[in-house]
Protein backbone atom coordinates (compact mmCIF):
# COMPACT_ATOMS: atom_id res chain seq x y z
CA UNK A 1 0.00 0.00 0.00
CA UNK A 2 1.39 3.38 -0.91
CA UNK A 3 1.62 6.27 1.53
CA UNK A 4 -0.91 8.13 -0.62
CA UNK A 5 -3.49 5.34 -0.27
CA UNK A 6 -2.78 5.10 3.46
CA UNK A 7 -3.65 8.78 3.78
CA UNK A 8 -7.03 8.21 2.08
CA UNK A 9 -8.01 5.19 4.14
CA UNK A 10 -7.91 1.43 3.74
CA UNK A 11 -7.57 -0.38 0.44
CA UNK A 12 -10.54 -0.53 -1.87
CA UNK A 13 -12.65 -3.68 -1.70
CA UNK A 14 -14.40 -5.67 -4.39
CA UNK A 15 -16.83 -8.56 -4.09
CA UNK A 16 -18.05 -11.33 -6.36
CA UNK A 17 -21.39 -12.33 -4.85
CA UNK A 18 -21.35 -15.90 -6.15
CA UNK A 19 -19.12 -18.43 -7.82
CA UNK A 20 -21.71 -19.70 -10.25
CA UNK A 21 -21.04 -19.91 -13.97
CA UNK A 22 -17.28 -19.47 -13.79
CA UNK A 23 -15.82 -19.76 -17.29
CA UNK A 24 -13.18 -22.33 -18.11
CA UNK A 25 -9.58 -21.27 -17.64
CA UNK A 26 -7.74 -20.64 -20.88
CA UNK A 27 -4.05 -19.89 -21.22
CA UNK A 28 -1.91 -18.76 -24.14
CA UNK A 29 -0.11 -21.52 -26.05
CA UNK A 30 2.82 -22.88 -24.06
CA UNK A 31 1.64 -21.59 -20.67
CA UNK A 32 0.48 -23.89 -17.87
CA UNK A 33 -1.18 -23.63 -14.48
CA UNK A 34 -0.08 -25.31 -11.26
CA UNK A 35 -0.27 -25.09 -7.49
CA UNK A 36 2.64 -24.11 -5.30
CA UNK A 37 5.34 -26.59 -4.41
CA UNK A 38 8.42 -26.57 -2.24
CA UNK A 39 10.84 -23.81 -3.26
CA UNK A 40 8.25 -21.62 -4.99
CA UNK A 41 8.69 -18.82 -2.46
CA UNK A 42 11.45 -17.40 -4.68
CA UNK A 43 9.15 -17.38 -7.70
CA UNK A 44 6.30 -15.80 -5.74
CA UNK A 45 8.65 -13.11 -4.38
CA UNK A 46 10.01 -12.27 -7.82
CA UNK A 47 6.56 -12.09 -9.43
CA UNK A 48 5.08 -9.92 -6.68
CA UNK A 49 8.20 -7.75 -6.34
CA UNK A 50 8.21 -7.01 -10.08
CA UNK A 51 4.47 -6.58 -10.54
CA UNK A 52 4.03 -4.39 -7.45
CA UNK A 53 7.34 -2.59 -8.03
CA UNK A 54 8.14 -3.16 -4.37
CA UNK A 55 11.53 -4.52 -3.35
CA UNK A 56 10.28 -5.65 0.06
CA UNK A 57 8.89 -8.90 -1.34
CA UNK A 58 11.40 -11.67 -0.73
CA UNK A 59 11.46 -15.31 0.35
CA UNK A 60 11.37 -14.52 4.10
CA UNK A 61 8.25 -12.41 3.49
CA UNK A 62 6.69 -15.30 1.57
CA UNK A 63 7.45 -17.61 4.48
CA UNK A 64 6.08 -15.14 7.02
CA UNK A 65 2.98 -13.82 5.23
CA UNK A 66 1.95 -16.62 2.90
CA UNK A 67 3.14 -19.92 4.39
CA UNK A 68 2.65 -18.50 7.88
CA UNK A 69 -0.95 -17.45 7.18
CA UNK A 70 -3.65 -19.60 8.85
CA UNK A 71 -5.28 -20.21 5.44
CA UNK A 72 -2.08 -21.54 3.88
CA UNK A 73 -2.28 -24.69 1.82
CA UNK A 74 0.07 -25.23 -1.14
CA UNK A 75 -2.90 -25.74 -3.44
CA UNK A 76 -4.19 -22.26 -2.57
CA UNK A 77 -1.17 -20.50 -4.06
CA UNK A 78 -1.46 -20.77 -7.81
CA UNK A 79 1.05 -20.09 -10.56
CA UNK A 80 0.91 -19.67 -14.29
CA UNK A 81 4.18 -20.90 -15.77
CA UNK A 82 5.68 -19.62 -18.99
CA UNK A 83 6.75 -21.79 -21.91
CA UNK A 84 10.07 -22.48 -20.17
CA UNK A 85 8.22 -23.77 -17.07
CA UNK A 86 9.13 -20.82 -14.85
CA UNK A 87 6.28 -19.25 -12.85
CA UNK A 88 5.38 -15.82 -14.22
CA UNK A 89 1.99 -15.06 -12.61
CA UNK A 90 0.47 -15.84 -9.23
CA UNK A 91 -2.73 -15.52 -7.22
CA UNK A 92 -3.72 -16.93 -3.87
CA UNK A 93 -7.08 -18.42 -2.93
CA UNK A 94 -7.04 -17.50 0.74
CA UNK A 95 -9.64 -16.98 3.41
CA UNK A 96 -10.04 -14.38 6.12
CA UNK A 97 -12.41 -14.37 9.05
CA UNK A 98 -13.25 -10.71 8.47
CA UNK A 99 -14.88 -11.56 5.13
CA UNK A 100 -17.15 -14.41 6.24
CA UNK A 101 -16.97 -18.14 6.70
CA UNK A 102 -18.09 -19.03 3.16
CA UNK A 103 -16.17 -16.25 1.36
CA UNK A 104 -12.82 -16.63 -0.37
CA UNK A 105 -10.19 -13.90 -0.37
CA UNK A 106 -8.38 -13.40 -3.69
CA UNK A 107 -4.95 -12.38 -2.52
CA UNK A 108 -1.59 -11.31 -3.95
CA UNK A 109 -2.30 -11.34 -7.68
CA UNK A 110 0.73 -10.51 -9.75
CA UNK A 111 2.17 -10.94 -13.23
CA UNK A 112 5.78 -10.39 -14.21
CA UNK A 113 5.92 -7.36 -16.53
CA UNK A 114 7.72 -9.40 -19.21
CA UNK A 115 4.53 -11.49 -19.53
CA UNK A 116 2.02 -8.62 -19.35
CA UNK A 117 -0.74 -8.32 -21.93
CA UNK A 118 -1.45 -12.05 -22.15
CA UNK A 119 -4.40 -12.04 -19.70
CA UNK A 120 -2.42 -14.16 -17.23
CA UNK A 121 -3.75 -12.15 -14.27
CA UNK A 122 -7.27 -13.00 -15.40
CA UNK A 123 -6.41 -16.70 -15.80
CA UNK A 124 -4.65 -17.12 -12.46
CA UNK A 125 -7.36 -15.15 -10.63
CA UNK A 126 -10.02 -17.29 -12.31
CA UNK A 127 -8.11 -20.38 -11.14
CA UNK A 128 -8.35 -19.04 -7.59
CA UNK A 129 -12.11 -18.56 -8.01
CA UNK A 130 -12.39 -22.15 -9.21
CA UNK A 131 -10.44 -23.21 -6.12
CA UNK A 132 -12.93 -21.36 -3.90
CA UNK A 133 -15.82 -23.14 -5.59
CA UNK A 134 -14.01 -26.50 -5.20
CA UNK A 135 -13.69 -25.77 -1.47
CA UNK A 136 -17.44 -25.12 -1.24
CA UNK A 137 -17.28 -21.35 -0.81
CA UNK A 138 -20.09 -19.19 -2.15
CA UNK A 139 -18.52 -15.76 -2.82
CA UNK A 140 -15.17 -14.00 -3.14
CA UNK A 141 -13.65 -10.68 -2.10
CA UNK A 142 -10.42 -8.86 -2.74
CA UNK A 143 -8.64 -5.67 -1.76
CA UNK A 144 -6.81 -3.40 -4.18
CA UNK A 145 -5.28 0.04 -4.54
CA UNK A 146 -6.89 2.93 -6.40
CA UNK A 147 -4.03 3.23 -8.90
CA UNK A 148 -4.12 -0.42 -10.04
CA UNK A 149 -6.46 0.34 -12.93
CA UNK A 150 -5.43 -2.61 -15.10
CA UNK A 151 -6.01 -5.00 -12.19
CA UNK A 152 -9.37 -3.40 -11.40
CA UNK A 153 -10.44 -3.85 -15.04
CA UNK A 154 -9.48 -7.52 -14.77
CA UNK A 155 -11.46 -7.94 -11.56
CA UNK A 156 -14.50 -6.29 -13.13
CA UNK A 157 -14.25 -8.73 -16.08
CA UNK A 158 -14.12 -11.56 -13.52
CA UNK A 159 -17.48 -10.46 -12.09
CA UNK A 160 -16.28 -8.48 -9.07
CA UNK A 161 -18.04 -5.23 -8.16
CA UNK A 162 -16.89 -2.35 -5.99
CA UNK A 163 -17.75 -2.75 -2.32
CA UNK A 164 -17.96 0.15 0.10
CA UNK A 165 -16.48 -0.85 3.46
CA UNK A 166 -15.09 2.50 4.58
CA UNK A 167 -16.27 6.11 4.52
CA UNK A 168 -13.66 7.03 1.90
CA UNK A 169 -14.62 4.27 -0.56
CA UNK A 170 -17.60 5.86 -2.34
CA UNK A 171 -15.64 8.91 -3.50
CA UNK A 172 -12.57 6.84 -4.31
CA UNK A 173 -14.59 4.38 -6.39
CA UNK A 174 -16.14 7.32 -8.26
CA UNK A 175 -12.64 8.60 -9.06
CA UNK A 176 -11.54 5.15 -10.23
CA UNK A 177 -14.60 4.86 -12.49
CA UNK A 178 -13.84 8.26 -13.99
CA UNK A 179 -10.22 7.23 -14.69
CA UNK A 180 -11.37 3.92 -16.23
CA UNK A 181 -13.83 5.75 -18.49
CA UNK A 182 -10.99 7.98 -19.71
CA UNK A 183 -8.77 5.05 -20.72
Image (cartoon, rainbow, N blue to C red):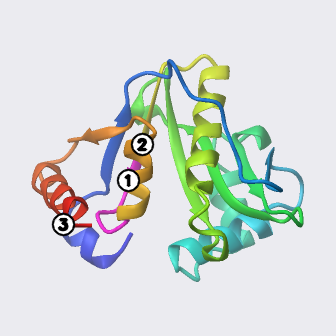
Q: Nearer the viewer, residue 43 or 182?
A: 182
Part of the protein shown in magenta: 143-148
Q: Residue at x 62, y 58 (%)?
A: 65
Q: Earlier in the sequence, mark 2 or mark 3?
A: 3
- Quadrant location, the C terminus: bottom left
Q: x, y (%) of residue 13?
A: 32, 46
Nearest the camera: 88 or 145?
88
Going by the image, does 78 lie left or right of 151? Answer: right
Q: Which residue is mark 3?
A: 8
Q: Residue at x 20, y 41 (%)?
A: 164
**Helix, strand or loop at mark 2:** helix
Up-down: is 164 above or below 7?
A: above
Q: 13 left or right of 36? A: left
Q: Which class describes the residues within 10 Å of circle 3: few (<14), some (14-19), or many (20+)?
A: few
Residue placed furthest toward the front? 29
Q: CA distance from mark 2 to mark 3?
A: 26 Å
Under tag 1, what secondary structure?
A: helix
On the image, numbered disc 1 is attached to which residue?
Answer: 153
Label 1 near label 3: C-beta < 8 Å? no
Q: Main secondary structure of the magenta part?
A: loop
Marks 2 and 3 in Cβ contact (< 8 Å): no
Residue 127 highlighted magenta (yes or no): no
Q: From the image, tell me which residue sits under label 2.
A: 157
User: What is the quadrant of residue 117 in the picture?
Assistant: bottom right
Amino acid sequence: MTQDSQDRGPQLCMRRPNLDDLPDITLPHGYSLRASREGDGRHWARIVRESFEDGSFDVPRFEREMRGHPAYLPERILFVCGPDGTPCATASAYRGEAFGEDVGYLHMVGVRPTHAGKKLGFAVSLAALHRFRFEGLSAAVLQTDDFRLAAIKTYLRLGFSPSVRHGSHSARWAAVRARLDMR
